Amino acid sequence: MSNTDIEMQRAREAVSEVRLQVSPEEAIRYMQGIRHKGFLKALRSNWRVDENGHATMQSVCWLFCWATMGKNNKNKKTSEACRTVFGKIFDHSYEWFAQEVPYELVKKWRYAKPSRLIGS
């Protein structure tokens, strides 16, 4: 299923609405509390905050993907922990985000370069 330009624009606007409600340092502390080696390794290479102290679009999408992977029972505790952290660090809930942004776009945007997000 492909997304129309309007759907992509709405999704991009929804992602851009999400702001940290804690300091960037506190957000990292919350995420460091998630006990999963792969997550903690990925945190170092995928979590970014811009010069204004906002989590980048890629970072929001990256954490959302970790929070969504719970369909695999092996990772259920990790995904639940990520959903909890998502709600603690951002001013929008995991559930709101899931309703506003199609998962296939989230997966695409989590590793996209910033310049690619403008027309993607």
Image (cartoon, rainbow, N blue to C red):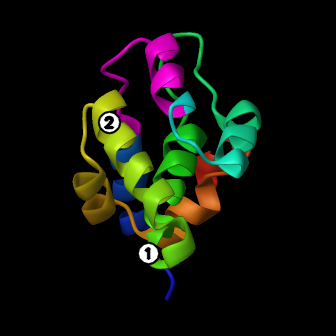
Number of numbered discs on residues: 2
Q: How far across and how far down the image is residue 63, in percent?
A: 51, 46
**Amino acid type, mark 1:** Thr
Q: How far across and how far down the image is residue 67, in percent?
A: 45, 56
**Residue in the picture at 45% in, 59% down:** 77
Left/right placement of residue 120 relative to residue 66 reads right
Q: How far across and how far down the image is residue 11, in percent?
A: 38, 57
Looking at the picture, does residue 26 appear above or below residue 36?
A: above
Name the N-terminal-most of marks 1 and 2.
Answer: 1
Looking at the picture, does residue 111 appear above or below residue 3?
A: above
**Amino acid type, mark 2:** Glu
**Camera-nearest residue between 13 and 94:** 94
**Element at label 2:** helix
Front label number (1 vs 2): 2
- Name the residue that disc number 2 marks: 17
Measured in 3D between alpha carbons, the distance from the residue under mark 1 to the one under mark 2, in whole angstroms, is 20 Å
What is the quadrant of residue 56 in the picture? top right
Asked if the residue under mark 2 is in contact with the one under mark 1, i.e. CB atoms within 8 Å, the reply is: no
**Element at label 1:** loop
**Residue in the picture at 62% in, 52% down:** 110
Report the magenta stretch's main SS.
Answer: helix
What is the quadrant of residue 44 in the picture? top right
Badge 1 density bin: few <14, some 14–19, many ≥20, Cα 10 Å: few
| Residue range corresponding to the magenta coloring | 16-31
**Camera-nearest residue between 92 and 109:** 92
Q: How far across and how far down the image is residue 4, in percent?
A: 43, 75
- Name the residue that disc number 1 marks: 4
**Camera-nearest residue between 52 and 60:** 60
**Residue in the picture at 65% in, 47% down:** 39
